[in-house]
């Protein structure tokens, strides 16, 4: 069974025109942080799953999506909330 880790913070990349995240972090094992490319690769290889709690209080999975230009990014399933659920999380310390 694949491990699932909770995401509780994000690191924005303010220089990125697509507003792609620089990375995500969470509380498991005393706190963790991984860069966006490592997280995308891990999810695609099914090495782990990520989830977070939406502002509505609902647990949602973090998934890999692709922009029309082919660039991959992370978002939550059925993310119709503005701002994006991941961008609404606190910044990583």
Image (tube, rainbow, N blue to C red):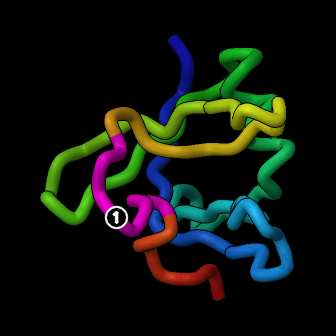
Q: Residue at x 52, y 57 (%)?
A: 28
Residue segment shown in magenta: 79-86
Quadrant location, the C terminus? bottom right
Q: Which element is circle 1 on?
A: loop
Classify residue 31 as left or right of residue 12: left
Image position, residue 86 (x, y; %)? 48, 61
Residue lying at 77% horizontally and 57% vertically, measured from the top left: 34
Q: Residue furthest front?
A: 68
Whether residue 76 is situated above or below residue 54 in the rendered picture: above
**Is 17 inside the magenta-drawn segment?**
no
Give the quarter of the image for residue 61. top left
Residue 85 magenta: yes
Query: Label 1, on which residue?
Result: 82
Front residue of 1 and 89: 89
User: Who's the residue at 39% across and 34% down the image?
Assistant: 77
Position in image of residue 10 (x %, y %):
60, 70
Q: Is 50 in front, or is 79?
A: 79
Q: Quadrant for residue 32, please give it.
A: bottom right
Q: Position of residue 91 (x, y in %)?
A: 57, 83
- Residue 71 or residue 35, whichever sits in front: 71
Q: Is residue 10 left or right of residue 69?
A: left
């Amino acid at each position: 069974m694949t491990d699932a880790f909770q995401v509780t913070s994000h690191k924005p990349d303010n220089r990125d025109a697509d507003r792609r995240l620089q990375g995500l972090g969470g509380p498991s094992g005393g706190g963790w942080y991984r860069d966006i490319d490592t997280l995308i690769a891990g999810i695609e290889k099914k090495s782990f799953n990520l989830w977070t709690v939406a502002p509505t209080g609902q647990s949602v999975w973090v998934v890999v999506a692709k922009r029309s230009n082919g660039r991959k990014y992370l978002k939550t399933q059925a993310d119709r909330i503005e701002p994006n659920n991941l961008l609404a999380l606190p910044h990583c310390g």
